[in-house]
Amino acid sequence: MNESSQSLFSFMQEQSGKIFSQLLAHIGLTFISLLIAVAIGVPLGIFISKKKKLSGSVLGFVGVLQTIPSIALLGFMIPLLGIGPKPAIVALFLYALLPIVRNTYTGIIGVDAAVKDAAKGMGMSGRQILAKVELPLSMPVILAGIRTATVINVGVATLAAYIAAGGLGEFIFGGIALNNTNMILAGAIPAALLAIVLDFILSKVQKLNLKKVNTAFWLFPLCVVLLSSFYLLPDIYGSKMLAGFTPEFMGRQDGYLGLKKIYHLNIRNVVISDAVMYKAAYEKRLDVISGYSTDGRLKAFDLIVLKDDKHIFPPYYVAPVIRKEVLQKNPSLANVLNQLAGHINDSVMTELNYRVDYLKQSPDKVAKDFLMEQGLYKEPRNGNSAVIRIGSKIFGEQYILAAMYSMLIKGNTDLQVETKTGLGGTKICFDALTNNQIDMYPEYTGTALLVILQTPDSIIRKLNADEQKIYNYVQQQFQKIYNLEWLQPVGFNNSYALMMRKEQSKKTGVYTISNLVNYLKEKE
Amino acid sequence: MITVENVVKTFDNKKAVDGISFEVKAGENAVLLGTSGCGKTTTLRMINRLAETTSGNIYINGKNIKEISPEDLRRNIGYVLQHNGLFPHYTIAENIAIVPELLKWPKEKIVKRTSELLEQLHLPQIYLSMYPQELSGGQQQRVGLARALAADPPLLLMDEPFGALDAVTRASITNEFSQLEVLKNKTIVLVTHDIHEAFKMGDKILLMDKGKIVQAGTAADLLFKPANNFVTEFFESQRMQLELNAVSLKDIWPFLDNTIFQNNLNEVSPDATIWEAMNILSLKKREDSITTNVVADERKPAGFDSLFIALSAYKRHRYE
């Protein structure tokens, strides 16, 4: 415990520059969107308090915006606004809108009718009543709405890292992907503190004497503008090539770190979610991305893989990882699951992924069609023996594999299956397995080697990027350390890869990573 | 001062005010009396255009109020509400200064006027920097009146001004308001459902029912010469007290006997009502008489009996 807190402290110290700049970006993102939300939300709230007939539909509409899952909202923004701060700010703005509009509306509606009547009866104009009576009297309620919106925004802004808008989410998602608790905390702790501090400050503003609220009303936007300026908009739209890497890729030895060390690649880059990266490349928002070699979107978006001519990306053969206890209880299971071994090579997997990711066929359908084609499919026996819980990470290939395993088990045994798909990342999946939340999931040898086992460089060098040696090594280690069993590999290698648009690759003559490095050097 | 001509107000096809006409002369206190829903408040609110007439016209000093912008019209009419409507975020001084500020008076004039008003309404000056919620209900109502009087408007509209107060405070503040020097020269239109308040404050009472004026006149007119059964029944439950309250010693002066003159009797103002005179008699232990004078140097004594006899004579003489 002592050791780990020490290392968290030293991690944060080591990364303090980065934490600080991410924190500033985070504050900036939060407040720019808040500023826009106040500028639009307060007048909108006032407007619907005057035109009550519209209030239902307007409040309903901003309420619906609030219910859209944040990551989906960010996804919707990509085709409209690309990646980077613009879509993030718009999404945050939409989230902040509901509490601000609703509280402005309720605040103004809630002003004592006798007071409004008196104001009118004394000859105040509508505008004077608003400025001198309604706004000052509803200010505590409006400020409460702004306070809620601020806290929501601090939280949602962590997701901005998914679309290359920066902020503390870079650490959080990087940490989740890399199984690095310190990194998660280095992002999560400042984010939580930020929310607490802002909430506290705003609660004080809210409780100010009614008289002083007038001053606060003017002071507040000033502060917000000041804080917004923290967000020095990341210089994204430059002339040179721009790379988009996932948080995971950014922090890995067989990722960006390795590219820098072995290839001396130096490219301007942003952190972005895997979910939107391919599309962003297709839409020319990004030029180089870190993808997976069997990804269906490779085909869909007309991208090509740059050849890894110095072999820094280790092989990623997929195989089911299963708890030993489960295998012992159900001895037939291993043979059933191994039926799939050797049936899927790289191009087959790319094709299957393409059907799911691009043709939008359901993973279940794709899995069933494939098994039938291979003669492996059997009608479910609908048995009622024990339940096998199959997990999967949150991308198409894993969904397909999980579906295939589920069908194999149901067709060949009396066991029941429960699938827990869409687990956020390696860490979440693996923790679920070791904590007995799931019984098995498909894992990649490379990921196991580097992320889960955190294998030292000396051993990695000895394994020499050999697929069989790596498989044997992780199998042994998993048995020894975690009491987990690796079954036979499915057959394809879904390794990391750098990708570019085909036509750009042709135009620039960049076909290998070394080509890319040289091309970038020429440009400078 | 105010002429209301055949005014109709409909809400959702229902007539709240159904073709009423009346006139209030300068300096007169008119009371719109009636039960809830009779249209009295709507009538009042149409005078300062808080409600717009559906048809008919209202003139103030000969000018149709439709030709004046609502804001300008309201700034020149004092308005007192049941729930005072003081701004909770304004100090008493700021509350009183609202209309003068709207009229863009110079600052010194506003300061002077505010403190002057507080004095006239018997409120201590320290209230100026306090907030409404720090004052009692009765005090708040007085500040509400001060605010209505701030720009010294010739016309005051009062909507159940004492309606939110408890019975005791209500009686004493009604009394106080009826005697306030600052209200003496104002034209007042007051809305109430309280008969005693109406009798106390009103030179002229407009008794309303179902959006129409049933009878208009002095309290005595309504009591002793009711236009129809509705009027009679309206006052039925409290008739005795009302009658005694509606007639002053001045009114019954000719019917008081002045044969026996006694010295050292309590002297009562001729403006006092018979009810007030009887209250004084009630408080006394041995003497059963009081005295009053209407004509200088002439006094007449009175006791319970002589007051009742004089009242009967007055009613007979005046209304039969």
Image (cartoon, coloured by chain):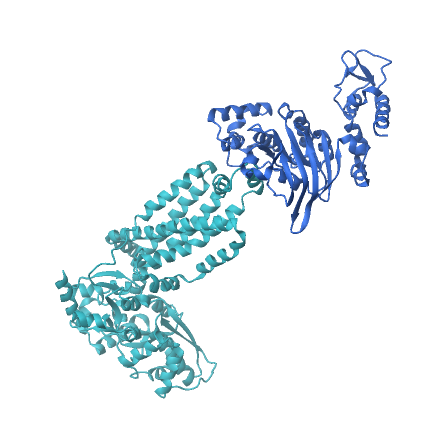
Chain colours: A cyan, B blue
For this rendering, which residue is in front, A350 or B178? B178
Relative side of B95 to B194, left or right: left
The spot of residue A160 in percent (x, y) is 33, 58
Q: In this view, does A100 lie above or below A467?
A: above
For this rendering, which residue is in front, A459 or B19? B19
| Picture residue at 36% right of the left edge, 46% below the top | A224
| Quarter of image, res A347 | bottom left
How many dots with numbers? 0
The spot of residue B59 in percent (x, y) is 63, 36
| Picture residue at 47% right of the left edge, 59% below the top | A61
For this rendering, which residue is in front, B231 or A110? B231
Image quadrant containing the C terminus of chain A: bottom left
Q: In this view, does B13 lie above or below B246?
A: below
Relative side of B276 to A337, left or right: right
Relative side of A229 to A419, left or right: left
Relative side of A30 to A381, left or right: left
Residue sticking out furthest to the bottom:
A375
The answer to whether any part of residue A328 appears in the image is no
The answer to whether any part of residue A418 appears in the image is yes
Image quadrant containing the N terminus of chain A: bottom left
For this rendering, which residue is in front, A482 or B52? B52
The spot of residue B252 in percent (x, y) is 81, 22
The spot of residue A431 in percent (x, y) is 35, 67
Q: Is residue B87 above or below residue A497?
A: above
